[in-house]
Amino acid sequence: MKTTTFVPTTTAGLLLILLTGTPGGAQDLTFEEYEPRSTLVVPEHPVTRARIPFIDVHSHHRRLTPERVDSVVAAMDRLNMAALVNLSGGSGAALAERVRQTAGRHPGRFVTFANLDFTGIDEPGWGERAARQLEEDVRLHGAAGLKIFKNLGLDLKDGAGRRVPTNDPRLDPVWARAGELGVPVLIHTGEPAEFFEPHDRFNERWLELKQFPRRARPPEAYPSWEEVMAEQHDVFRKHRGTTFINAHLGWMGNDLDRLGRLLDEHPNVVTEVAAVIAELGRQPRHARAFLVRYQDRVLFGKDTFAEEEYHTYLRLFETADEYFPYFRRRHAFWRLYGLDLPDPVLRKLYSENARRVIPALRPGAP
C-alpha cells in the first residue's frame, strides 16, 4: 500500500498539526480543551510550607466535625499556618457551637466571625435589633468580627421586592455597633467587573461565565459594577469609626492604583487577597511595589481551604519564579510571576496586619 508523507508548507498547516495531532485532521479543539504544556526552562522553587507563619483571614467552614477540625489543623501545621478565620459562623447558638468546635478544641488556631440574619428587615427597629444580636454574638458567643456576604447589594430583596443596597440606612446601626465593639467587618460586595460586562470574546472571564452562566450580572437584572461598589464605598465613608476588611482586593486587583486611592481616602479600610492572586501574579513589578507601599493595609486570605492551592499563594509571595501556573484556569488563563516580597513586608501580609485588625488574634486574647 502506497503511503504519502504530509509536509506542512504554511504556518497554518503546522499549527493545525500542533493543535490536532493529525495532519489535515478535522478535530475541533475548543478553548476549554486547549492546555499547552510550557516548554520554558527556568529556575523553579515550589513552596509547600511558608517560611514565616501566616494567618488566613478568609476561610469558610460551615460543616464541622471533630475529625474535620483535626484534619484542617494538621494541614495548617504542614503549611505553617498559625491561625485561620472562619467567616461562616452564623449567629446565636449556631455560632457558639462553631466556636466550641474549633477554638475550644484547638485554642489559638481559629477565630470565627458572625453573620447577619436579614429576616424582618422591613420591620421597624430591625437595624437596632441586628446590632444587639451582633453585640451578643461578640460578648457572649465568641465572635471575632462580622462577615457580610455578597447577597447584600446584589440579590437581597426587601418585602417590596426592592434590592437592598449595601449602604441601606437600615444597616447603619450594625456598622456603628461593630465600631463600638472594636471588631472588624469583613465585607464582600459585588463580583469581578467582568461578570457585569457582555459575555463575549472580549471578556477575560469568558470561560468562567460559560461554565457558570448564573454568575453573569446582566444590566436588565442588576445595577452596574460601578454603582454596586460605590454603595460599599459610601458605607466606608459614613462609618469611619468602624474597621472594614474589603474582601478580594475590592475587586480592583486589576487596577491597583485605583485600589490605592480607595485606601488613601479611607484609613478605616484594609483589604485582603483571597481568590485574586492571579491578578497580582500577572503584574509582578507593579504588584510588588503596591504591596510594599501599602504593607500595613493588606492581609492574607484564601477563600477555599485546599492545602495544595496554598502552595501557589506561598510561591507567589515568597519567590521570584517566572511563568508558573495558577491552579484554576477559569480565573486566569495566564501564568504567574513571583513577587519575592521582603521579609518585613511578608510578615505584615502573613500575620502582623491580621493581629492588629482582628483583636481576637492577638496573643493572650480570650
Image (cartoon, helix red, strand yellow):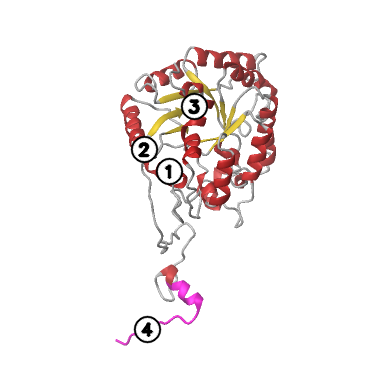
Label 3 is placed on what type of residue? Arg
Q: Check if residue 218 falls in the magenta segment.
A: no
Measured in 3D between alpha carbons, the distance from the residue under mark 3 to the one under mark 1, in whole angstroms, is 19 Å
**Mark closest to the chain's N terminus, 4 or 1:** 4
Q: Residue at x 49, y 44 (%)?
A: 341
Residue 94: image location, x then y, percent: 45, 18
Eye-nearest disc, 4 or 1: 1
Measured in 3D between alpha carbons, the distance from the residue under mark 4 to the one under mark 3, in whole angstroms, is 68 Å
Eye-nearest disc, 4 or 3: 3
Q: Element under label 1?
A: helix
Q: Give the class, few, some or many, for how many residues have Cα within 10 Å of label 4's Cα (few <14, many ≥20).
A: few
**Mark closest to the chain's N terminus, 3 or 1:** 1
Q: Give the class, few, some or many, for how many residues have Cα within 10 Å of label 3's Cα (few <14, many ≥20).
A: some
Eye-nearest disc, 3 or 2: 3
Quarter the N terminus occupies: bottom left
Question: Image check: 294 left or right of 108?
Answer: right
Measured in 3D between alpha carbons, the distance from the residue under mark 2 to the one under mark 1, in whole angstroms, is 9 Å
Question: Image check: 25 left or right of 276?
Answer: left
The label on residue 314 is 1
Residue 318: image location, x then y, percent: 44, 45
The residue that label 3 is drawn on is 355
Measured in 3D between alpha carbons, the distance from the residue under mark 4 to the one under mark 1, in whole angstroms, is 49 Å
Q: Residue at x 65, y 25 (%)?
A: 158
Q: Give the class, few, some or many, for how many residues have Cα within 10 Å of label 1's Cα (few <14, many ≥20).
A: many
The residue that label 2 is drawn on is 79
Q: Nearer the viewer, residue 363 or 261?
A: 363
Magenta residues span: 1-17
**Mark closest to the chain's N terminus, 3 or 2:** 2
**Mark closest to the chain's N terminus, 2 or 1:** 2
